Amino acid sequence: AQTVTQSQPEMSVQEAETVTLSCTYDTSESNYYLFWYKQPPSRQMILVIRQEAYKQQNATENRFSVNFQKAAKSFSLKISDSQLGDTAMYFCAFMKRNAGNMLTFGGGTRLMVKP
Amino acid sequence: DAGVIQSPRHEVTEMGQEVTLRCKPISGHNSLFWYRQTMMRGLELLIYFNNNVPIDDSGMPEDRFSAKMPNASFSTLKIQPSEPRDSAVYFCASSLGTGSNSPLHFGNGTRLTVT
């Protein structure tokens, strides 16, 4: 079974600054995918970024980028130029390849962006 | 694209009553997932369907919970009888295919309160 750990329950950052959210996972699989989801106060779960484990290049989506360290089983999310709208819960998630698209989530990190 | 539609958005019921949560997946998606979110346990997968067939229901807490998917455009999660510990946010998600090129799209969730 896979486990996903987010060791930072809460974080805060000043608007326009950069923040990094941590995620580690444990798996014996070699082919898998990793995701970050954002959950704002509206409760909707929004896909932020995803990474294929077989790709060495770190994924980026505008102000969001990841630092994927496969050997260390680490998958951190960097948010650059933080905006007030980035205030949300952020969940790291693991998906085993060819296993029905099931996601295993971490416990989440609550991010507060301060003006 | 209307996204995944869940109803109701909020449900308050008394212990012992039957509760039915509803989900309409994105048209064309053939995988559907029910997740439960609580403060204590985070996001847990309850059950998932592929092509309307339940594939993995190992996350269903107990016999009081049941899920159906009578057709490709509708699914229900039923709790009978409900208990206060069932209070949570229940998410439905859908995806196209079973490869991770098709991420999960979540509905806005149903907040269930059992008194």
Image (cartoon, grey):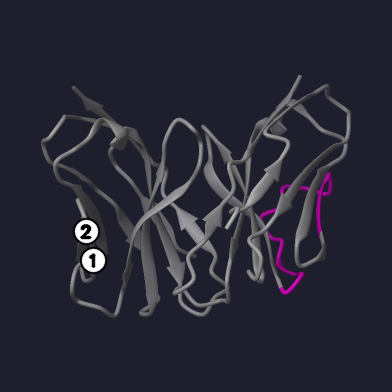
Residue in the picture at 21% in, 23% down: A114
> Contact (CB < 8 A) between labels 2 and 1?
yes
Task: Note whether B82 is above or below B55 in the view shown.
Answer: above
The residue type indicated by label 1 comes to Ala
Which range of residues does the magenta coloring cover? B51-68
Horizontally, is B18 left or right of B25 in the view? Answer: right
Q: Which residue is mark 1?
A: A59
Q: Helix, strand or loop at disc 1?
A: loop
Q: Which of the two discs, 2 and 1, labels the residue nearer the N terminus? A: 1
Residue in the picture at 50% in, 41% down: A44
| Percent x, y of residue B114 | 75, 25
Q: Chain of mark 2?
A: A
| Percent x, y of residue A89 | 38, 37
**For residue A66, what is the image quadrant?**
bottom left
Residue in the picture at 56% in, 76% down: B98
Which of the labelled discs sits on residue B105, or is there none? none
Q: Which residue is mark 2?
A: A66
The residue type indicated by label 2 comes to Val
**For residue A76, what is the image quadrant?**
bottom left
Q: Chain of mark 1?
A: A
